[in-house]
Amino acid sequence: MNTYNLNYLVKDLYLIKPEITISIVIVLLVLVDLIMNKNKKLLPYIAIAGLFVTGYFIIEHFNSSSFAFATRSSIGMMAIDPFGNFFKLLIVLSSILIILFSISSSEIKAGVERHGEYYTLIFGMILGMMFMVSSVDLIVIYLALELVSLSSYILAGFTKQSLRNSEASLKYVIYGGISSGIMLFGISIIYGITGSTNLYAINSVLQAAQGPGLALYLSGLLIFVGIGYKISAAPFHFWTPDVYEGAPIPITAFLSIASKAAGFALLIRFIKIAFIKSVDPQGFWHLLGAIDWKAIIIIISILTMTLGNFAALWQTNMKRLLAYSSIAHAGYLLLGLAVMSNEGIAAIIIYFAIYAFMNLGAFLIVMLIANKIGSEELDDYKGLGFSAPFLGVSLGIFLVSLTGLPPTAGFIGKLYIFIALVDAKMIVVAVIALLNTVVSLYYYIKVLKNMFIDKSDKEIPRFSASYGAIALVVVMLTPVLVLGVYFTPLVDLAKSSIALLGL
C-alpha cells in the first residue's frame, strides 16, 4: 500500500516539474545571496537559467493531459493540460524579459543591496501564478493567489527612496486584502452549498441541483470580485493606476502581463469547469442556469474598456496612461470569454501572445527614456522622436499595435476577438468595442504627437540606449511586426491550446 502511494506521489511530482524547478531556483537565489553577500551580479543570470529550464519542462509535456494530487473526494487538485501549459509558457517568457528589464533599470540598480530579495520575490510570484493557471481546487487557487499577491505587494514598494513607491505598496496591500477576503467568503459559501472545493465536484453537484438559489449567485459573484481585482476589470480596477505609477517600471510591466494572464486563465477555468453543462459541435458552451455569466461578463467588459479608454484620455504620465490602457485591454480580452465558445478562448490566447510583446515593449521604451531624462511625464516627451529616433520610432510601433492597426500584430489580436463576437451574433457588443478602439487611437496618437510634432522648450541632446537594451527592443519589435503579416503558427498554437482537461 505504501509503495502504491509512493508511486502516485512520484507521478504527481513528475507532472509539476516546472513548479518544482521554480521552487529550487528560489532556494538557490536565497543561498547565493547569503554566500555572495556583496556581489549580486550572478543573481539575474541564475534566475534566467532557471526560467529556461522551466520552459523546457513545460514544452516537453505541452500536450499532456492528466490530473495531479488526487484525493478520496476529487480526481485531482491540479490539471496539467495544453491550456495551462500555454499560460505557463507566457508567464515564463514574460518573466525572462522582466529580468532583462531589471538589469537595465536605474530604479532597480539603486537598490542593489536588496537584489536577492527582489529576484526571490519575483520567483515567488512566478510560482504562485503557475499554480493559479493549473489549479482546479478553490483552496489551492486561493493559496496561489495569495502567494502572488504577497510577493507583488512588496515588489510594488521595492524602491524605498521614492514616496510614491511606498504609497503604491500600501494601497495595493489594502485593496488586495479586501478583495482576498471577499473571495474567501465566496469560497466558503460555495463549499457550504456543494460540500466540496474541487471545481469538477462542484459542477457535478450543480448539475444535479434543483435550482440556483441566491447563495450560489452570491458566492459566484464574490469569487469573481477576487479574480476581477487581479485582472484589473472595472469596477475592481481602482488600484491599478496608482500602483502602476508608483511601482518600479519592471514590476509594473510584470503585473500588466504575467499577473493578468494568470488571472484570466483562472477565470476561464473557473467558469468553464464549475458552471458548464455541455459544448456543442460548433464549440459554443452551454452553461448551467445557476448564474448568467454571459450577461455579467458582457457588462463588465464594456464597462472596463470604456472606463479604461476614456480615463486614459486625460493622463499626462506615461505609466498612468499605459495603466488605463491595460485596463481597456482587459475589457477586450473579457469579450473573448463573453462569447462563451472555444473560438473565443482561442482569440484570448492569440491576443495575450501578442499583447505580451507590444505592452512589454512599450514599458521597456518608457523605462529606457526615464533612465535618460529622469521623467515619465508626457510633456517631457516633446521632441524625443528626434533626440532618440530609434526609441521614438519603436515606441510608435508598439503604440500603433496596442491600438490594433494593421500591419502590426495588435490588429490580428483584435481581429480574432471581433470574429468570435460576429460568429456569436454579438454585433452590438462588437460595435461598442470598435468605437472604444477609435477612442484609444486618440491618446496613443497624443504620445506620437508629443514625440514627433511638438517642440520642447529646452534643447534635448541626442541619446540612445545601450546595445543590450536595443537588442531587447528588437526582440520585442520582431514578433509585433512579423505576426502582423504571418500569424498562422500562432493561430494553430492557440487552437491546440484551448483544451481544458476533462472537457
Image (cartoon, rainbow, N blue to C red):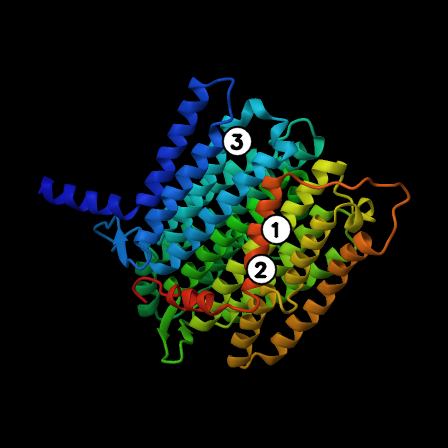
In which quadrant will I find the C terminus?
bottom left
In which quadrant will I find the N terminus?
top left
The residue beneath circle 1 is: 361
255 or 489, which is in the foreground? Answer: 489
Give the residue displayed 63% in from the left and 37% down from the top. 248
- Above or below, 369 against 344 in this view is above
Asked if marks 2 and 1 touch (Cβ < 8 Å), the reply is yes
Residue 239 position within the rendered picture, expressed as x and y whole percent measured from the top left:
64, 46
Local packing at callout 1 (Cα closer than 10 Å; few below 14, some 14-19, many 20+) is: many
The residue beneath circle 3 is: 118
Asked if marks 2 and 3 touch (Cβ < 8 Å), the reply is no
Total marks shown come to: 3
Give the residue displayed 38% in from the left and 55% down from the top. 85
Q: What residue type is labelled 1?
A: Gly
- Above or below, 170 against 235 in this view is above
Q: Could you tell me which secondary element the residue under label 1 belongs to?
A: helix
Q: Could you tell me which secondary element the residue under label 2 belongs to?
A: helix
Relative horizontal placement of residue 317, taking residue 305 as reference (left or right): right
Which is more foreground, mark 2 or mark 3? 2
- Above or below, 127 against 302 in this view is above
Earlier in the chain: of badge 2 and badge 1, it is 1
232 or 218, which is in the foreground? Answer: 232
Residue 77 position within the rendered picture, expressed as x and y whole percent measured from the top left:
30, 50
